[in-house]
Image (cartoon, rainbow, N blue to C red):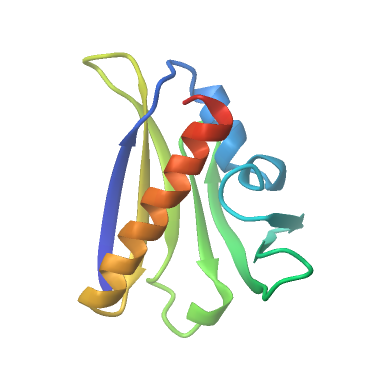
């Protein structure tokens, strides 16, 4: 497994705004997946519309620190618990703006390139829907 870390500066000085977009189903549904259902410590993500081919994956929330990070584990990675994906936020000392950090894992270089593209697309969608 290859650990990947992505950093996305956002156009806000409010950690609360970003936290609301990364820490719950309602916020994640705006930019990460077409449908997100949160039940207890599980989030189910669905991409695609009901009339098209759909992809559904489930993550278990394993750690949350409000206004800091949310760590999840994809259900298909249960055999490799170190393969956690995380979204964390920090405030830049220089600009005061919030920075979103994404940590994810890839099996190889090709998957790493694919994941970078996926996260870049997701953050572009986040910018479009939120103005951040």
**Residue 126, how many percent across, how many down?**
51, 38
Is 122 located above or below residue 110 in the figure?
Answer: above
**Residue 62, how many percent across, how many down?**
55, 59
Is 108 located above or below residue 60 in the figure?
Answer: below
Pick the front one: 49 or 80: 49
At x 42%, y 41%, the residue is: 88
At x 69%, y 48%, the residue is: 25
Q: Please identify the residue farthest to the front as the structure is shown.
A: 51
Number of marks present in the image shown: 0
Q: Please identify the residue farthest to the bottom as the structure is shown.
A: 79
Pick the front one: 55 or 3: 55
Is 53 located above or below residue 96 in the figure?
Answer: below
**Residue 91, how many percent across, how many down?**
35, 23
> Residue 58 is drawn in which quadrant?
bottom right
At x 31%, y 74%, the residue is: 111
**Residue 64, how many percent across, how many down?**
55, 46
Q: Please state, as top left, top right, bottom left or bottom right, where the N terminus lies in the image.
A: bottom left
* Residue 94 appears left or right of 50: left
């Amino acid at each position: 497994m290859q650990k990947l870390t992505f950093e996305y500066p956002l156009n806000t000085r409010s950690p609360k705004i970003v936290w609301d977009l990364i820490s719950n189903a309602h916020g994640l549904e705006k930019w990460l997946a077409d449908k997100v259902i949160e039940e207890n410590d599980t989030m189910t993500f669905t991409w695609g519309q009901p009339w098209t081919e759909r992809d559904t994956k489930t993550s278990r929330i394993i750690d949350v620190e409000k206004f800091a990070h949310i760590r999840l584990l994809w259900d298909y990675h249960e055999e490799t618990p170190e393969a956690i994906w995380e979204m964390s936020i920090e405030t830049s000392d220089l600009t005061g703006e919030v920075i979103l950090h994404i940590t994810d894992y890839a099996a190889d270089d090709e998957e790493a390139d694919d994941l970078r593209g996926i996260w870049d697309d997701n953050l572009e969608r986040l910018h479009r829907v939120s103005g951040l």
